[in-house]
Amino acid sequence: MSGAEPPVTVRLFAAAAEAVGSEQALLGAATVGELVAQLVSMGGPETAHVLGRCAILVGGTRADDPATPVPAGVVVDVLPPFAGG
């Protein structure tokens, strides 16, 4: 965990989990942008590309803006695009 930000639970699924190397992380981030930057630093060279295609849900609500606040104690889900119909 970084800084003095309270921890949030991040759940990663499918390709996002593979890219980061974990299905769950406990991170301290004030915004979605900070959280994504931490996840990119945890993963391999393709992590930024994979996460750039993912939907990020903060407390169940989609967060498309990197400036979206990440409240303390919230669960953040990182979902890659799904194929199929």
Image (spheres, grey):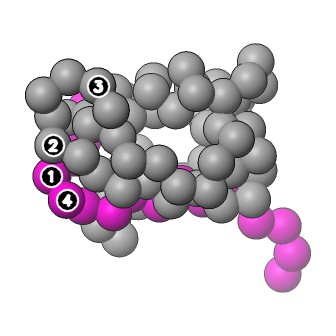
Dot 1 or dot 3, earlier in sequence? 3
Q: Which mark is residue 73?
A: 4
Q: Are marks 1 and 4 in contact (CB under 8 Å)?
A: yes
- Most extreme residue toward the right, as rendered? 84
Q: Could you say which quadrant of the image residue 79 lies in?
A: bottom right
The amino acid sitting under disc 3 is Ser
Q: Secondary structure at mark 1?
A: loop
Residue 68 in the figure: left or right of residue 21:
left
Span of residues in magenta: 66-85
The amino acid sitting under disc 4 is Gly
Residue at the disc numbered 3: 2
The amino acid sitting under disc 2 is Pro
Residue at the disc numbered 1: 72
Q: Are marks 1 and 3 in contact (CB under 8 Å)?
A: no
Dot 2 or dot 4, earlier in sequence? 2
Q: Could you say which quadrant of the image residue 34 lies in?
A: top left
Crowding at dot 4, Cα within 10 Å, few <14 / some 14-19 / many 20+, comes out as few
Q: Could you say which quadrant of the image residue 58 lies in?
A: bottom left
Which sits in the foreground, 3 or 15?
3
Give the residue at x 46% y 32%. 36
CA separation, marks 1 and 4?
4 Å
Magenta span has 67? yes
Q: Are marks 1 and 2 in contact (CB under 8 Å)?
A: yes
